[in-house]
Image (spheres, rainbow, N blue to C red):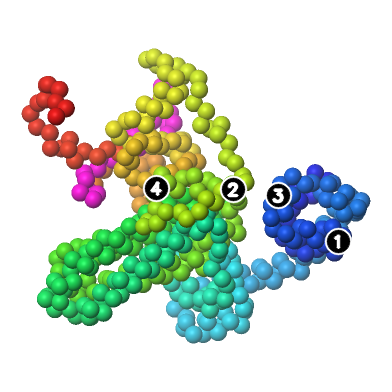
Amino acid sequence: MEINAKSKIGELLKEYPNLIEFLPTLSPVYKKIKNPILRKTLGRTATLEMIAEMGDIEINTLISKIKSEIQNKESSQVPIAEKRKEQLKEIIRDLHKGEDMNILKQRFAELIKDVSPSEISYMEQSLIDEGMPESEVKRLCDVHVEVFKQSLEKQKRPKTEPGHPVHTFMLENRESEKILGQLDSLLELLGNSPDKKTFETHKKNLENVVDRLSIIDIHYLRKENQLFPLLETHDVSGPTQVMWEIHDDIRADMKILKKYISQENTIETVTIIKKLTQMIKDMIYKEEYILYPMSLETLTEKDWLKVKKGEEEIGYAWVKPKGDWSSAETISDEEHNISGVLSLDTGALTLRQVNLMLKHLPIDISFIDDKDEVAYYSDTAERIFPRSAGVIGRKVQKCHPPKSVHVVEKILKEFKDGKKNVAEFWIQLSGKFIYIRYFAVRNKKGEYQGTLEVSQEITNIKKLEGERRLLDWV
């Protein structure tokens, strides 16, 4: 970061937090900088030139002392930090090799007494960047947490204002814990090998509790569509992809559990409940001791405002935000300027008319540009698949579960190579028949310009027979 008279003190303190303690040694006036509220307000506008004047210090002297402090701090800390990172990564590698857990715990205890959530995230990201498959990191993710658990539990869970996205996420976690407690109570009544009569006695209650627990999918969707895209803009993607894979494992097991209950597969039901509840409890732990603290360290106030603005598009699991948190930051509305007229090949429409037309289509559409980035999605009243503004500008590969990314890549490659123009799928989802098509978008020269995704719920269309020639609104 370049440091000169026009440098903003807020940006400087964010980049070099050690200056918060250093600056007051230069002038008593700078003790105010230790106040986090003042740092937020003053930091956005005050330049080093203004700070120098406040402390009655010549600007060149101030800059020189700041640069010297930064250099001294970096020279004393970087080698240690890099060494620690490599040692932490070596512990993870040995985990994957099957080393004894107790020995690894001892090595970790000798290495470090505490470790920040960001370091764990950075370490996993480094392993993925170096070629370790995300599926491998996921496979032993629980073991990673087990190694770090003692250190992490010394840290306090993050605290945020009511209404802040993290506050709402954690409210949902408390609610999910209550439901998990109900499942645990039912397991005690069922036992490990319940007979048919005992199972039938508790079947209805079990179905109700599992249906309520399945709402956790909304919690995961908000993470995937709101939180993860913003973290990716700060080069944090590996750990979030690993977490998404675990979300999908939970979703898959939830479907299997419902099937087992319906078929009254008693022992299988008990077995998968134990597995599923442990996965969800572990996910809560990872969120509150790793993901949320790391996110709070990484994301800016403007980022959190973007997360907040898109929440209601996806919805909430069991609870609503409690509080009216808002950021002092604002998001420009320039991108929403829909004035003007658009000349088309077969007519002309105002941009407002185009926007309304797309919103009223009986299908969901998304457009991915030639750089594989999501440029648009139609905000229809009843979207089939949840979307939020957080996906705009996101690589389309990041918008899909890791296990299906290879299919996305194959479609895009065939479209770009000019070998294919259409890819289509159909699935059954919650009793609905969904028809999904991808179209290569090309200019008059046949050059690839992007991909159009079209999703349509066709359950009733499939049932149509004969004709209807008269209006029937009855």
Judged by depth in the image, the label closer to the viewer, 3 or 4, is 3
Q: Residue at x 21, y 44 (%)?
A: 433
Residue type beneath disc 3:
Thr
As for residue 448 lying within the magenta part, the answer is yes
Give percent across and percent down for residue 225: 44, 49
Task: Decide which of tag 3 and tag 1 comes sooner along the chain.
Answer: 1
Position of residue 266 relative to residue 430, above or below, is below
Which residue is found at the position 33% from the left and 30% from the top? 360
- Labelled disc at residue 28: 1
For disc 2, the marked residue is: 327
Residue 108 point in image, percent of width and height: 57, 79
Is 105 magenta? The answer is no
Q: Which residue is mark 4?
A: 314
Which one is nearer the viewer's eye here, 191 or 271? 191
In whole angstroms, how far apart are the C-alphas of marks 3 and 1?
Answer: 19 Å
Q: Residues within 10 Å of mark 3 (few under 14, many from 20)?
A: few
Judged by depth in the image, the label closer to the viewer, 1 or 4, is 1
The tag earlier along the polypeptide, 4 or 2, is: 4
Q: Determine the secondary structure under disc 1.
A: helix
Residue topped by disc 3: 41
Question: Between disc 2 and disc 3, whose residue precedes?
Answer: 3
What range is drawn magenta here?
A: 428-453
Which residue is drawn at the image coordinates 66% and 71% (left, top)?
Answer: 83
Please give the label number shown on residue 38: none
Q: Is residue 33 left or right of residue 410?
A: right
Q: Residues within 10 Å of mark 4 (few under 14, many from 20)?
A: some
Question: Can residue 289 be seen at all in this image of the molecule?
Answer: yes
Of callouts 3 and 4, which one flags the residue occurring earlier in the amino acid sequence?
3
Q: Main secondary structure of the magenta part?
A: strand
Neighbour class for label 1 at 10 Å: few (<14), some, many (≥20)? few
